[in-house]
Image (cartoon, helix red, strand yellow):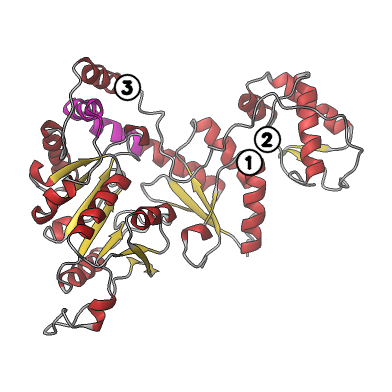
Amino acid sequence: MEVYVSSIPAQVVADIRGRLESGTLAPGDRLPSTRALAEQLGVSRGSIVTAYEQLAGEGILVASSGGSRIHPALPIPAFPPRHTVTAVCPAPPLEMLRPGAALTEALTTSTWRAAWRAAAAEPHAYASPGSPRLRHLLAEHIRLARAMPLGPESIIITGGARDGLRALLAALSASGVAQRLGVEDPGFPSLHTVPHAVGWEVETMPFDDDGTVPPPSVLPGHSAEHSPVAARSPSAVLITPNHQFPYGTQMPAGRRRQWVEWRQSMPGALLIEDDYDSELRATHPALLALDPGGTVLLGSLAKILTPALGLGYLVVPERLRDAVAAHVTPVSGIAQDALAQFLEADGLRRHTARVRREYKYRRSVFESIFPEGNAMEGGLGATIELSPTAESDVLHRARNHGLAVESLAKYWSAAENSGIVVGLGTGSREKLTVALTTLRGLIPQPTRT
């Protein structure tokens, strides 16, 4: 909501009138509670109560035990436009319920602050593949968290998941492989920009209840060199076996084995395992553990810590390490040392436990408000399926209420499903509950039979 130069109640009244005149509010729309709106604007609750009382007196608003709504029978426009008012500041960016946004409020511990103080006190710079100390600690972290022993020499520090993917594809391009990358459908649409930037074609791969479906394999006893199946297959595939986005599907062991069999039938092909939030949920062996010679683990701590860290890692087969390391963007030495200090102090393990508990609570809030929705198990997002018409209407109205939910269709290459994707990582518990309650008021209740 915008802030105007006049009394607070008059500003609120003028804003709601303006939204009605422009069509961004409609008869029957639910308004935030007086307490929630006062908190959002940083003003007293009494000012909001005064504004709502004026609107009710004019017949614009009706109050009930379920909250305040625009009068369902209100004709639009029901009144002549009032004087024009001028905003003194732009509307804040939409943040609440943004898909993919990580919970960063929990990262305020003394251990985290001490790690950065220690790193800043003696700053260092590291050439690729990165800090030896951090690589050793990450290898230990992966061994304990994923039951997957590996040496620090296999780890390359990157500037994040996208930098790691870019460096890997650039190294593969230099080796002369066909520049075709298979990606999940649905999946992160923003990931397509990385392969396109380095000249790779993107091929979408189908999806079923077990996750992404492998392309056809070359039959045993047949040569892949002259096989039409191999000629049409991607040179590398990027998959998220632990947490497909946006549905949260976890790939079962049988499907993982199918992917390994496909890769092994295609000499030179590579599996790229996007391990973007394995700390939140990882109950099956990593593809890397099943096929270490043909799999790259694309790691990022952005979801469990913060995207602002600007740091990730790759676990790379020996034959590719030097080539990939040569394409990685330099990473802040202070950030590397701070993360190493945090790992040494057992900060990541304890922080992960806190975040898991918090996301469990947030999922329970979502499920209580949206029993028809689908919350990712162990994750930070949820989906609500809607008709295409309802999706468009809800997205439009959600933005007018300051909610950053996204279209489910945008995650599909052919918009096969419609609905919305909801993020559970932003804001305090109280703000999340208010935001989800507001969203509930914009979505038709499911029909009970």
Q: Which residue is mark 1?
A: 438
Q: Which residue is mark 2?
A: 32
| Residue 350: percent from left, percent from top | 26, 31
Please name the amino acid that badge 2 sits on. Answer: Pro
Left/right of residue 10 with respect to residue 306 in the rendered view: right
Pointer 1 with pointer 2, Cβ within 8 A:
yes
| Residue 372: percent from left, percent from top | 54, 56
Q: Find residue 419 and report its image quarter.
A: bottom right
Q: Which residue is mark 3?
A: 109
Tell me, yes or no, whether the highlighted magenta stretch contains residue 337. yes
- Mark 1–mark 2 distance (CA, rounded to whole Å): 7 Å
Q: Are there few (<14), some (14-19), or many (20+) residues within 10 Å of tag 1?
A: many
For the record, the magenta segment spans 331-356
Tell me, yes or no, whether the highlighted magenta stretch contains residue 234. no
Mark nearer the N terminus (2 vs 3): 2
Please name the amino acid that badge 3 sits on. Answer: Thr
Q: Give SS at disc 2.
A: loop
Query: Eyeballing the image, is 75 above or below 358?
Result: below
